[in-house]
Each structure stands twice: as C-alpha cells, then as structure tokens.
C-alpha cells in the first residue's frame, strides 16, 4: 500500500508569490524579498548584520522557486531555469515502443516496489504524476517535479548518467552532454519516470547493444 505523506499545513491565504518571497526571508531579522531601490532584493531591518543584496539570478533563485512550488503545490518557475541552462541537454521524444535495455533498467530501479512508494501530498486523482531517477521512492505532482528539476539544474547530478552514474564533462561546442528522457506513463498509476542518459549509454541503447 502506498504511503501518502501528510500535506503540510500552511496559511490558506499564502500564494506562490508570498511563498517565493518567504523562501528568501532573512534568518537574522524580518527582512524579506521585495522590489525596492536596488530592484528585487532582500531588504533587511536597521542593525541587521546581513547586508542587503540583489537577488541571485541563478541557483538561489531556482531554489527559492522550488521551495515556493513545494509549499503551495502550484508551479513557480524561476526565469534562469528557462534561459539556456540546458543548452547541452537534449530532450528525447519517448516514442511509443518499449524502453531500451538501459532505459528500462533505470525505470525499474527508480520505481522499485510500487506498493511501497511515498506520495507527494499535492497529488490529486487523474492528474499527472512523476518520478525522478535521482530521487527514487516518491511520486511527485507536476509542481514538485518541476521544483526537483530546478533544484538539480546546474549541479553535478544534473549531468550524471542515471544508468552508468558517470559524470559528463562539458562537450565541445554544439555537442550533447546528456539525453533527458521521460518514460511513457505506467498504466496502473499514470506515473512518468524522468531520467537522463549520457550519449554513450543512449547510443548503445539505440544500437541495440545488450547490457
């Protein structure tokens, strides 16, 4: 039997923007994210030991957006996630046939024992559900899947093959670093498994090379 995680309690008035702002809240004073004299920045109270600063446009912004998604169950995407951060990661159309050997092995390892999987508290019947290979054992709603993707973007895990577990260094200009793949939904739950294969593993699968 699946284990449905308890949905975290929160202020029902909280919306994605306020959750995003709260993710940047100062730990020393009541300073929060706002649009002020320096643009979007965390503005601190007088006497706070932390200096005000412009909000990080990269990883910190993606982490804050991910936190907001997880708090509300509504998708919050930071602009840096959409602007060229995946230029060497190619998306693959899953197609309609069975998964190739290496892809199938990743899917099997990710899903494990379906009856013991943990579930995102935001999941609703009939809505898409996802699993990510680097975090097996939990089924995620769309918002939390995107949150997980934003947290991972730009990290070493983002360019580590989910089959051979080899880190992929940056390729020459125009080269492919990783192949991002989504499995077809599993009929019994409609779960889609999201993972990545390095070019050698993907090419071996395409050539029919057995494991």
Image (cartoon, grey):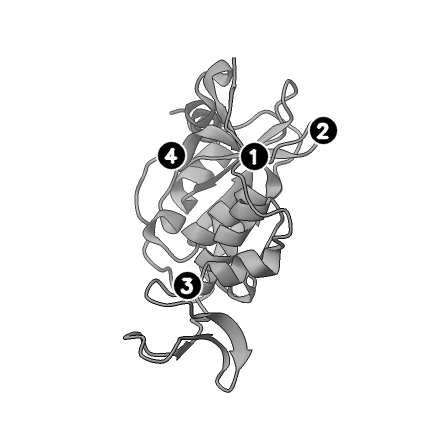
Q: Residues within 10 Å of mark 2 (few under 14, many from 20)?
A: few
C-alpha separation, residue under disc 3 versus residue under disc 2: 33 Å
Q: Which residue is mark 1?
A: 130
Please state if 130 lies on the left or on the right of 116 as rendered: right
Mark closer to the chain start, 1 or 4 = 1
Please state if 159 lies on the left or on the right of 127 as rendered: left
Q: Pointers 1 and 4 in contact (CB under 8 A)? A: no
C-alpha separation, residue under disc 1 versus residue under disc 2: 13 Å
Please state if 12 lies on the left or on the right of 203 as rendered: right
Q: Which residue is mark 3?
A: 60
Q: Pointers 3 and 4 in contact (CB under 8 A)? A: no
Q: Which residue is mark 2?
A: 126
Classify mark 2: helix, strand or loop.
loop
Name the residue at 63% across, 54% down.
Answer: 15
Closer to us: mark 3 or mark 4?
3
Q: Pointers 3 and 1 in contact (CB under 8 A)? A: no
Q: Is residue 189 above or below residue 164?
A: above
Classify mark 3: helix, strand or loop.
helix
Mark closer to the chain start, 3 or 1 = 3
Classify mark 1: helix, strand or loop.
strand
Q: Is residue 166 above or below residue 14?
A: above
Name the residue at 33% across, 36% down.
Answer: 164
Q: Is residue 18 above or below residue 106?
A: below
Closer to us: mark 3 or mark 1?
3
Q: Which residue is mark 4?
A: 163
């Amino acid at each position: 039997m699946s284990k449905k995680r308890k949905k975290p309690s929160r202020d029902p008035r909280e919306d994605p923007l306020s959750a995003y702002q709260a993710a940047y809240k100062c730990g020393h004073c009541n300073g929060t994210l706002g649009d002020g004299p320096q643009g979007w920045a965390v503005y601190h109270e007088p006497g706070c030991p932390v200096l005000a600063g412009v909000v990080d446009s990269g990883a910190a912004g993606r982490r804050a957006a991910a936190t907001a998604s997880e708090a509300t169950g509504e998708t919050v995407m930071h602009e840096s996630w959409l602007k060229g951060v995946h230029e060497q990661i190619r998306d693959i159309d899953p197609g309609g046939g069975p998964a190739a050997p290496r892809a199938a092995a990743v899917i099997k390892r990710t899903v494990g024992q379906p009856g013991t999987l943990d579930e995102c508290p935001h999941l609703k019947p009939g809505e898409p559900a996802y699993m990510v290979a680097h975090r097996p054992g939990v089924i995620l709603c769309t918002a939390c899947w995107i949150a997980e993707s934003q947290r991972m973007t730009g990290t070493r895990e983002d360019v580590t093959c989910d089959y051979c577990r080899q880190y992929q260094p940056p390729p020459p200009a125009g080269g492919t670093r990783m192949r991002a793949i989504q499995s077809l939904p599993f009929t019994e739950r409609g779960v889609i498994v999201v993972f990545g294969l390095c070019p050698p593993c993907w090419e071996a699968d395409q050539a029919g090379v057995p494991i």
